Each structure stands twice: as structure tokens, then as C-alpha cells.
Amino acid sequence: MADTRESPVRLVSYQFARAQGALLLELSAQEATVCLREGARAQALAELRRVLGVPIRVARV
């Protein structure tokens, strides 16, 4: 059966990543790994969680 999930690049736009300081690094069926820039807001994580539909693991830069 083919994987029908969208590419992470399409799920999280460049504009969102730049404005919010949150970059999607990895996405699996179990979790997403997101890299946050210093000063990134918690609302960015909440929005990523909503869009991706999986728990978020944070990696700081």
C-alpha cells in the first residue's frame, strides 16, 4: 500500500518556519522532531502539533 502522507515540506511552509522559528526535522507516524530557535513561541509548537497530528519532540539550536 502506498504512503499517502504529505511531505513535511508541504505540511510546514517556509514562511511559517521562518516567522515562528520552528523547523520540522523529522516526521514519523509516532512523533515529529522540531528544531526551535531561541525565543520561539509556544504557540508555534501548538500549531505544529495540530497540523502534524503527532506528539512533538523539541531539539534546541
Image (cartoon, rainbow, N blue to C red):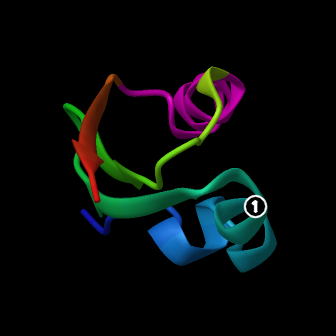
Note whether residue 5 is visible: no
- Give how far across and how far down residue 50 sits, in percent: 63, 25
Name which residue lies at 69% across and 70% down: 18
Dot 1 falls on a residue whose secondary structure is helix
Q: Which residues are magenta?
A: 43-54
Name which residue lies at 64% across and 64% down: 17
**The N terminus appears in which quarter of the rendering?**
bottom left
Note whether residue 17 is visible: yes
Q: Would residue 48 be counted in the magenta stretch?
A: yes
Q: In this rendered view, identify the residue nearer to me: 57 or 55.
A: 57
- Give how far across and how far down residue 59 sits, in percent: 23, 46
Q: Is residue 45 left or right of residue 17?
A: left
**The C terminus appears in which quarter of the rendering?**
bottom left
Q: Amino acid at mark 1?
A: Phe
Compared with 23, 60 (above or below) is above
Q: Is residue 50 left or right of residue 54?
A: right
- Magenta span: helix, strand or loop, mainly? helix
Name which residue lies at 53% across and 65% down: 6
Name which residue lies at 48% across and 67% down: 8
Q: Is residue 49 left or right of residue 12?
A: left
Mark 1 highlights which residue? 16
- The part of the image, by quadrant, that contains residue 11 is bottom right
- Give how far across and how far down residue 30 sits, in percent: 19, 31
